Image: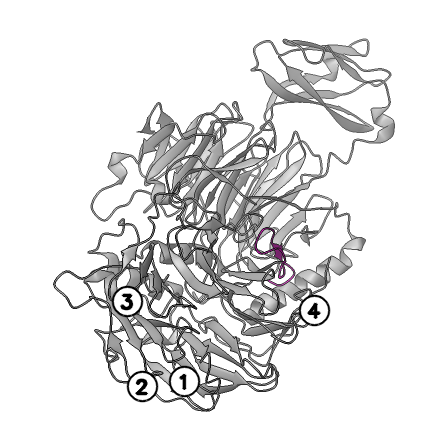
């Protein structure tokens, strides 16, 4: 594994919440502009803004914030402020030290391997994609060497023009990348502007630099210690590789010594704007902030803002501007202006052009005519907005927001190129476009679904995302029969189903919680946001043939249904439950209320069914844990945690043991041995980072536990006094969900930015080789129901049969075992795989049997 160096300044810094200062609910709020808000304060502004607006219109701008809040809610301290870069680095260093010391523990080995999606097929007609791309860059010395920057999966490199991609930043604590530049004199020198400038999926730690082609990285003199500063474009002087400029939310920074030191040469918010060198007059630099155009004629030492013809920076005019130039005419400059405050044309202010090198501009689009063209088609220009200009024809302009539009008249008239819900056309690019740019004669598009390229001026596009494992998963569910069948929900890319070694995007929108029927490995379920629709497939995702709308009692005025991630849970016999304000059970093609009353205030956030007893269910609402002993009909408050509950896990065989994780950087892992009434902390060894999910491994006498955190996976069992990192080969990425398949002995992780991963997990440690070699056999196997166990010279005191969920379905004690032989009758059991656990005073062993 490559070694990555991180040099962060460790000084105290108060960290505030910040989504996007250009968002319409923030644009006129001074605290929002400075980032000096808690997450709850920003949520309040957001809810006030949307209280009288339709959030369900495609491109309304509502979903980007909900994704941000859902991710960062568990990454705040007890005051509601986001975890700082310093705190992330401290946690990372603690994790690294623990890995160095782990030889002194009994920690089993891990060996994580990527599962994908590396590529996928589309099972329908929705906007199909794999993951968001913020920026595309091509090495100026080698057109086959390309880079993409993603919001949470870091920087990726291709040396074959986008056919295959290699991650370069997996050993860094989870980062996004919004700007890339490669030294034109040395392709091994790469600079990245870190963070996600558009939605804050990750925050910026400044500019990082590699001198070995991306194998290792170091911070530069431009390092940020807060969570509100963003970084976007980064550019290098065309003839002097010591001079670079970076556009940030604190201003334009310049270095003249290849990144060692930086100077803020122009104040303002430039993070979502643009900065460019003139293609001929290389001392001239142009830049746009969120509402102003700037020009420098001294290589960026000073900037002025004196151009005429642009809309004035008032409250009703631009809140975001982006800019592009072209080598086809060094005097041409285009600016696309958007305003969160404008209620018409989805906030489009207009496309402006200068033909005199930025001294004056003219409105080119028909924005002020009686029948203006809305080429944004979306209210979320604050989140995704893109502009490109042909390098050979200065009159050809491309814009992107929801879809791609083109003008051949310098912006005077636009034609729509594609449609986000028509993925079968050869001009398709995924909805929500963040980047448009020419490298050579190729036009690249970076969107919420991936990276696309056109070599024919947008007449057609080719998807280049294959092999880039950049998906942002919320949840994953794995078949009990085989780890080769699974289904997960992705940010803005719907439900992705995996079977026969292939990924299928079988429904759209934001894919959320998912499930696989434990009695049928090909029956998949998946929610979209707010539980607004449940989509199912009876053929492992090859097609979508089940749809169930949200319960009518749970929707209405100002009510979308359930939570952003509405919980879905399936018990051992395939009954499907969902949590809204009440608990519901799926009956045919509709939901039937299961609980006799609403559970807590607001909507349910998590559901758990005890693997050993379907009647015992837990639900979490905020920091309250409720328990039912009659399959969710009656629910009573069992426990109140100190912060919101982020996951629930019941022990696989002991109904008295239940685990929960709680929210925030100070959140804990808690264990109850009395069925959820009292809990004690078992958090020793875990850093102060988000604990997203806990899962218990059944059929193992050491009771292994796994926790998914914002920095990977941790492990603990009964033989250990603390948690230890369990992450060999796993990127340092946020793990949002974990699943176990006992048949294959696999642990599967869903990450937010690096797709799905899996590793082998330990078998029962009490199964010794000498005990296995005592001529124990089970026959016939497979059988239609009657099995005989020949015990050799072993006299066991207990034999138990488990189903694939970990539930004990049959038990034999020593008084029913005679003549070193016993029989098992599973005639009434369903067909499938079962486990026989045989225990004696000297050890245990587990064998697999198949009921035909």
Q: Judging from the image, what secondary structure is the residue with disc 3 in?
A: loop
Q: Is residue 608 highlighted in magenta?
A: no
Q: Earlier in the sequence, mark 1 or mark 2?
A: 1
Residue on which the image places disc 3:
411
**Foreground of the two, 754 or 444:** 444
Q: Judging from the image, what secondary structure is the residue with disc 1 in?
A: loop
Q: Earlier in the sequence, mark 1 or mark 4?
A: 4
Quadrant in the picture for residue 422: top left
Tell me what residue is drawn at x 66 percent, y 48 percent: 715
**Foreground of the two, 11 or 280:** 280
Q: Earlier in the sequence, mark 4 or mark 2?
A: 4
How far across and how far down the image is residue 267, in percent? 40, 85
Is there a contact, CB below 8 Å, between mark 1 and mark 2? no
Q: Nearer the viewer, mark 1 or mark 2?
A: 2
Is there a contact, CB below 8 Å, between mark 4 and mark 2? no
Give the spatial CA distance, label 1 vs label 4: 33 Å
Q: How many marks?
A: 4
Q: Nearer the viewer, mark 1 or mark 4?
A: 4
Q: Earlier in the sequence, mark 1 or mark 3?
A: 1
Tell me what residue is drawn at x 80 percent, y 54 percent: 103
Q: Earlier in the sequence, mark 4 or mark 3?
A: 4
How far across and how far down the image is residue 158, in percent? 61, 57
**Foreground of the two, 168 or 529:** 168
Q: Judging from the image, what secondary structure is the residue with disc 2 in?
A: loop
Is there a contact, CB below 8 Å, between mark 1 and mark 3? no
Mark drawn on residue 267: 1
Q: Nearer the viewer, mark 4 or mark 2?
A: 2
Residue bounds of the magenta highlight: 159-174
Residue on which the image places disc 4:
212
Give the spatial CA distance, label 4 vs label 3: 42 Å
Give the spatial CA distance, label 3 vs label 2: 19 Å
């Amino acid at each position: 594994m490559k070694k990555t160096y991180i040099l962060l300044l460790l000084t105290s810094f108060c960290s505030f919440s910040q989504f996007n200062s250009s968002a319409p609910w923030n644009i006129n709020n001074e605290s929002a502009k400075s980032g000096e808000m808690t997450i709850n304060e920003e949520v309040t502004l957001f809810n006030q803004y949307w209280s009288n607006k339709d959030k369900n219109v495609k491109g309304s701008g509502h979903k980007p914030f909900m994704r941000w809040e859902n991710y960062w809610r568990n990454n705040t301290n007890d005051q509601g402020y986001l975890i700082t870069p310093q705190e992330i680095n401290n946690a990372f260093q603690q994790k690294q030290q623990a890995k160095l010391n782990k030889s002194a523990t009994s920690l089993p080995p891990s060996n994580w391997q990527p599962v994908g999606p590396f590529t996928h097929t589309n099972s329908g007609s929705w906007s199909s994609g794999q993951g968001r791309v913020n920026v595309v860059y091509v090495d100026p010395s080698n057109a086959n060497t390309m880079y993409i920057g993603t919001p949470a999966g870091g920087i990726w490199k291709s040396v074959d023009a986008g056919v295959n991609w290699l991650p370069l930043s997996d050993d860094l604590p989870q980062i996004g990348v919004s700007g890339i530049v490669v030294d034109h004199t040395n392709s091994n020198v790469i600079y990245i502007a870190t963070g996600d400038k558009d939605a804050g999926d990750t925050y910026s730690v400044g500019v990082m630099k590699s001198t070995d082609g991306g194998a290792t990285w170091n911070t530069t003199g431009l390092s940020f210690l807060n969570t509100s500063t963003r970084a976007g474009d980064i550019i290098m002087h065309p003839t002097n590789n010591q001079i670079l400029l970076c556009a940030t939310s604190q201003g334009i920074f310049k270095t003249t010594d290849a990144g060692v030191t930086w100077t803020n040469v122009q104040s303002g918010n430039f993070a979502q704007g643009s900065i460019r060198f003139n293609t001929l007059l290389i001392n001239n630099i142009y830049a746009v902030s969120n509402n102003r155009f700037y020009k420098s004629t001294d290589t960026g030492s000073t900037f002025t803002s004196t151009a005429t013809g642009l809309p004035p920076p008032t409250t009703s005019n631009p809140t975001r501007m982006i800019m592009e130039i072209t080598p086809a005419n060094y005097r041409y400059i285009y600016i696309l202006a958007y305003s969160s405050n404008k209620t018409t044309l989805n906030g489009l202010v207009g496309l402006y052009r200068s033909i005199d090198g930025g001294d004056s501009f003219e409105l080119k689009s028909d924005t002020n005519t009686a029948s203006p063209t809305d080429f944004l088609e979306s209210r979320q220009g604050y989140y995704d907005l893109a502009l490109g200009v042909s390098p050979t024809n200065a009159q050809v302009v491309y814009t992107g927001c929801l879809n791609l539009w083109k003008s051949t008249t310098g912006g005077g008239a636009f034609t729509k190129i594609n449609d986000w819900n028509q993925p079968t056309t050869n001009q398709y690019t995924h909805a929500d476009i963040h980047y448009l740019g020419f490298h050579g004669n190729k036009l690249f598009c970076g969107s919420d679904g991936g990276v696309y390229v056109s070599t024919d001026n947008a007449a057609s596009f080719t998807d280049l995302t294959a092999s880039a494992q950049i998906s942002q998963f919320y949840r994953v569910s794995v078949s009990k029969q085989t780890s080769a069948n699974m289904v997960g929900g992705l940010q803005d890319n719907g439900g992705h189903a995996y079977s026969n070694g292939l990924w299928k995007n079988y429904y759209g929108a934001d894919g959320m919680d998912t499930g696989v029927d434990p009695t049928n490995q090909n029956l998949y379920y998946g929610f979209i946001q707010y539980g607004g629709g449940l989509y199912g497939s009876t053929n492992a995702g090859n097609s979508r043939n089940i749809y169930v709308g949200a319960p009518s009692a749970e929707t209405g005025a100002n009510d979308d249904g359930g939570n952003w991630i509405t919980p879905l849970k399936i018990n051992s016999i395939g009954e499907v439950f969902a949590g809204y304000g009440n608990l519901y059970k799926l009956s045919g093609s509709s939901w039937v209320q299961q609980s006799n009353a609403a559970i807590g205030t607001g909507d349910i956030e998590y559901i758990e069914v005890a693997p050993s007893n379907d009647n015992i269910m837990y639900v979490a609402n905020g920091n309250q844990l409720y328990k039912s002993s009659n399959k969710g009909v009656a629910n009573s408050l069992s426990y109140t945690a100190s912060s919101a509950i982020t996951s629930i896990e019941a022990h696989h065989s002991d109904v008295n043991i239940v685990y929960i994780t709680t929210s925030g950087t100070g959140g804990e892992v808690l264990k109850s041995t009395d069925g959820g009434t009292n809990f004690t902390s078992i958090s020793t060894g875990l850093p102060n980072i988000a604990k997203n999910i806990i899962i218990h491994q059944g059929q193992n006498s050491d009771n292994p536990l796994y926790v998914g955190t914002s920095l990977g996976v941790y492990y603990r069992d009964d033989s250990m006094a603390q948690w230890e990192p369990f992450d060999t080969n796993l990127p340092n990425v946020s793990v949002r969900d974990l699943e176990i398949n006992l048949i294959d002995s696999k642990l599967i992780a869903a990450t937010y930015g690096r797709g799905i991963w899996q590793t082998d997990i330990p078998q029962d440690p009490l199964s010794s080789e000498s005990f296995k070699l005592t001529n124990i056999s089970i026959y016939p196997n497979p059988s239609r129901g009657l099995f005989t166990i020949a015990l050799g010279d072993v006299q066991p005191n207990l034999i138990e049969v488990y189903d694939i969920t970990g539930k004990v379905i049959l038990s034999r004690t020593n008084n029913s075992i005679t003549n070193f032989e016993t029989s098992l009758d599973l005639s009434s059991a369903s067909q499938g795989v079962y486990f026989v656990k045989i225990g004696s005073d000297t050890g245990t062993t587990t064998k697999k049997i198949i009921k035909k």
